[in-house]
Image (spheres, rainbow, N blue to C red):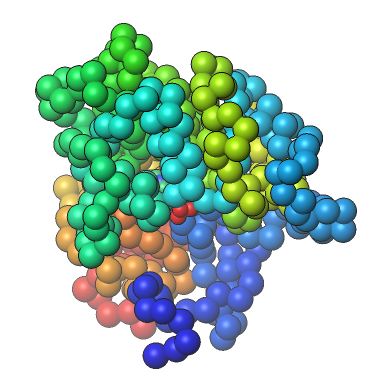
Amino acid sequence: MTALFNNYSRRPVSIVEGKGTIVKDANGKQYLDFTSGIAVCCLGHAHPALVKTIQEQSEKIWHISNLFESPGQVALAESLVEDNHLAHALFCNSGAEANEAAIKLARKHTGKHHIITFENSFHGRTFGAMSATGQEKIQKGFGPLVDRFTYLPFNDVEALKETVDDTVAAIMLEVIQGEGGIIEVTEEFAQVINEICENSDVLLIVDEVQTGIGRTGTRFAFEQTPLKPHIVSMAKGLGGGFPIGGILGTAELYETFGPGSHGTTYGGNPLGVAVAQTVIDHVFDSSFLDEVQEKSQYLICKLKEALPQEQFEIRGRGLLIGLDCGKEVATLVEKAEQEGLLLVAAGPQVLRLLPPLTVTTEEIDSAIEILKKILVEEKSPVS
Ligand SMILES: *Cc1c(COP(=O)(O)O)cnc(C)c1O
């Protein structure tokens, strides 16, 4: 027992420093970090540009609140909507908070309450976001939940068509269910959702908290699908390790949140915004994104070479890759860690590979060697 609450099952390793993809624990042991702090450290650890930004901005101003104008927020918002159909942004501090804002905006705009989400989705742990999450284990013991969420089977066109009626304010989904096991939305399902949302007053909320900011090889993952969201939530990669989240919305939503209707003290403070701007300046560069896609193909190709395809299913896009092992992976995460590779599970049977977007092919090769050792040569004793 420690002075901390017991709400995490932590690995018995304390990471004390990191550079790029490599982190070091308190005993000096090195690891390849293929968790990126759960899809957060998109530019790796201690990226020189982020270190410089934090140093410089911390000497100017950290926090002033939204009582005052924020040219930094305006510039960041412009960068985030520059290359898509979205028009405005609002900043907060986390993914759950971003989804709260999305849900509140959808309710206020439509005047309706009912929101359709999906089984095995994950939208966060605050009341609204937890209620949106289609997983009993996340909600257990915390009820009563926020009302009027319906969880439908993911990628089930019939169930969706049967359920949508004029009570529905919004449909909310992840392009790739991250925590739920790296399950991609199908092209057909995305098409149907889009038709529904274009031909009625149902809003489309896409939760890009995990998939956004270059993680899947494009600025946002929805760009690779027929989805045309009215609201996009983001966090994780946005601050590259500094806590910041936000939503983007279409022009028609501009009037919905009037002054005083929604907000947060820290949201978009100058320190967070400066870091996020540096992240975006790097990640939204088209040659950077091309490289993410090349590394993704390299990683997938090497995984296919190394692992027997009948035993392992590889899913995902960009550098959000799931390796479905068809069995419990908890002990595999431990074995990988002993061999110097940090991984995170996505559901009980899937290993998630989330290297920094700056990972090198040599680092991918080293990770593949370790995966091969723990997954294929499992029975031969490790020396
Ligand atoms: C991580 C995650 C969240 C929650 O973000 P927090 O910053 O932990 O609140 C919400 N949605 C998705 C898709 C996520 O992966």
Query: What residue sits 26% from the left and 43% below the top?
Result: 147
Question: Against 231, is 268 above or below?
Answer: below
Could you say which quadrant of the image residue 351 lies in?
bottom left
Question: Against 20, is 28 above or below?
Answer: below
Query: What residue sits 65% from the left and 63% below the top?
Result: 19
Could you say which quadrant of the image residue 372 lies in?
bottom left
**Image coords of residue 290 (percent x, y):** 57, 31
Note whether residue 268 is visible.
Answer: yes
Question: Against 316, is 287 above or below?
Answer: above
Q: Nearer the viewer, residue 46 or 155?
A: 155
Residue sticking out furthest to the top: 199
Quadrant of the drawing holding the C terminus: bottom left
Query: What residue sits 34% from the left and 15% below the top?
Result: 201
Query: What residue sits 55% from the left and 40% below the top?
Result: 262
**Image coords of residue 248 (percent x, y):** 54, 30
Residue sticking out furthest to the bottom: 1
Q: Nearer the viewer, residue 369 or 349?
A: 349
Count of picture labels: 0
- In this rendering, position of residue 355 left or right of residue 87: left
- In this rendering, position of residue 141 left or right of residue 317: left
